[in-house]
Amino acid sequence: MSAKQVVQPNEIARPAGAWSPAIVVTEPRRLVFVSGFTSRDDKGRVVCEGDISGQTRQVCENLKATLEAAGGTLADIVSVTVFTRDITQFDAIHAVRREYFPIEPPASTMVEVSRLVDERSLIEINAIAVLR
């Protein structure tokens, strides 16, 4: 049995996006709490202004680099919280997330907010990972 197990109750609808209703971690592991990332590149510049797909991709790349530096991978992420300036961009955000979480996506919460740390930022994602 994998240390990470997706729970999909028959009593609720299957997720429309790239997320799982719940994740059960069956063995003690190292927890990694990843701060929220916006679409800043390695020089600290906001990239893909006005492009939610491009910003989501940069955020996922930032999460990936951070998890790898901690000794893990995106597959180790069990939960994310997504803050977006426009919830109507759900489909575009999840199209990119499916590229990064093709199987067993993390549990997820997405909320619309009025502003992020930089007015050019359209999305921010934080994460919790359980390293193998």
Image (cartoon, grey):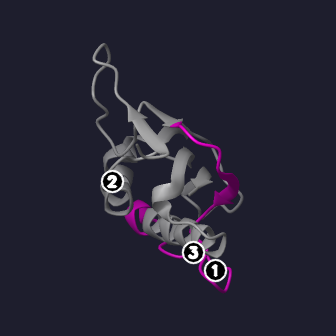
Residue 126 visible within the image: no
- Residue beneath disc 1: 45
Secondary structure under badge 3?
Answer: helix
Decide: marks 3, 2 in contact (CB < 8 A)?
Answer: no
Closer to viewer: mark 3 or mark 1: 3
For the point 64% across and 75% down, the residue is 69
What amino acid is at disc 2? Ala
Q: Nearer the viewer, residue 58 or 25?
A: 25
Instruction: Of the two numbered discs 3 and 1 on the same chain, state the one appearing first in sequence.
Output: 1
Residue 31: x %, y % from top left: 68, 51
- Residue beneath disc 3: 65
Residue 49: x %, y % from top left: 50, 70
Image position of 91 (left or right of 6): left
What amino acid is at disc 1? Arg
The quarter of the picture where residue 114 lies is top right
What amino acid is at disc 3? Ala
Residues shaded magenta: 25-54
Closer to viewer: mark 3 or mark 2: 3
For the point 28% across and 22% down, the residue is 13
Residue 64: x %, y % from top left: 52, 69
- Residue beneath disc 2: 92
